[in-house]
Amino acid sequence: MALDPAIEVLDKRFYALVIHNAHIDHLWSGARWTEGPAYHPAGRYLLFSDIPNDRTLRYDELSGTVHVFEQPALNQNGHCLDLEGRVVSCEHRGRAVSRIGHDGRREVLADRFEGKRLNSPNDVVVHSDGGVWFTDPTYGIDSDYEGDRAESEIGASNVYRIDPDGSIAAVITDMVRPNGLAFSPDESILYVADTGVSHVGRACPPDIRAYPVAADGRTTAGGPFAYTTFATCDNGVFDGFRVDRAGNVWSSAGDGVHCFAPDGTLLGKIHLPEVVANVEFGGLKRNRLYICATTGLYAMYLNTAGCVPGVGPA
């Protein structure tokens, strides 16, 4: 059996992560810029954003159909589920992080920091202690294409944590445009992508940084500037990404999906015909990688599975 020709193996460890008779599925097209996938296991569906068209879409895993979940949607970008299975959303136009309760009502979790409006929350992840970590670059206020053009009130693009009691703290303040983020399986590391090349060029390399997390899980250890460069993108930028149960990082890139071992070695790539913005593990076994790639939604079964926050390595 031969690998799908779209799979490029760069390290022999990648052979153990891909399935030899599995192929890329092109599930749907019709968006301007797909983003923010979040899988809902109880409903067997994937939520994802079409930011410029101001809508959130729902892919039904059983029927294979895509329907509008919400429109207008405040130009939502990233999504995730909290510990109770509620949908947490990053809103460009709302300039907020919100949550949809089980009753369907929208609740704002954060829209200001120290009295100033947030820029345009981009991506979000929930820690096992219930804390909500999110990135806040300016992409939603840079133009009217993905939000409403406005000046930044904060004057910086940071990573924040919303405590379960509702308080908000800036946990990383040394990035140009923080974007995708995810925890390692044991939550000892927070990975954050910086896409600041869009604003300052190669003065900001398209990296994923690894920040050690403090023992209490509430901030980064050693302060906001204590990090190592985990990986640098060789095609486009790293946007959104996910971590599997073994600690491998599966990231979006200009030519598809790049997979990195926990030691930062580039193991292989899944090439796509469109620029990839984000990925998410789904399916009952969490072994199907959903891929948001510019105008369409793709997927591929893998020989690994996404990790659940706080559960730890396999």
Image: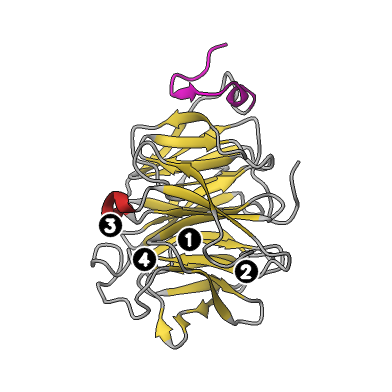
Residue at (41, 77) in percent of width and height:
118
What is the number of the mark on residue 200? 3
Front residue of this view, candidates 222 and 179: 222
Amino acid at circle 2: Thr
Q: Position of residue 283 (x, y in %)?
A: 62, 42
Q: What element carries label 1?
A: loop
Residue at (50, 25) in percent of width and height:
23
Mark nearer the N terminus (3 vs 2): 3
Q: Is mark 4 on a helix, strand or loop?
A: loop
How many angstroms separate mark 2 from mark 1 (CA)? 17 Å
Q: In which quarter of the image is residue 294?
A: top left
How many angstroms separate mark 3 from mark 2 (CA)? 27 Å
Q: What element carries label 2?
A: loop
Front residue of this view, candidates 156 and 60: 156
Which mark's residue is nearer the viewer, 2 or 1? 2
According to the picture, the residue beneath numbered tag 2 turns out to be 219
According to the picture, the residue beneath numbered tag 1 turns out to be 123
Q: What element carries label 3?
A: helix
How many angstroms separate mark 2 from mark 4 (CA)? 28 Å
Front residue of this view, candidates 205 and 78: 205
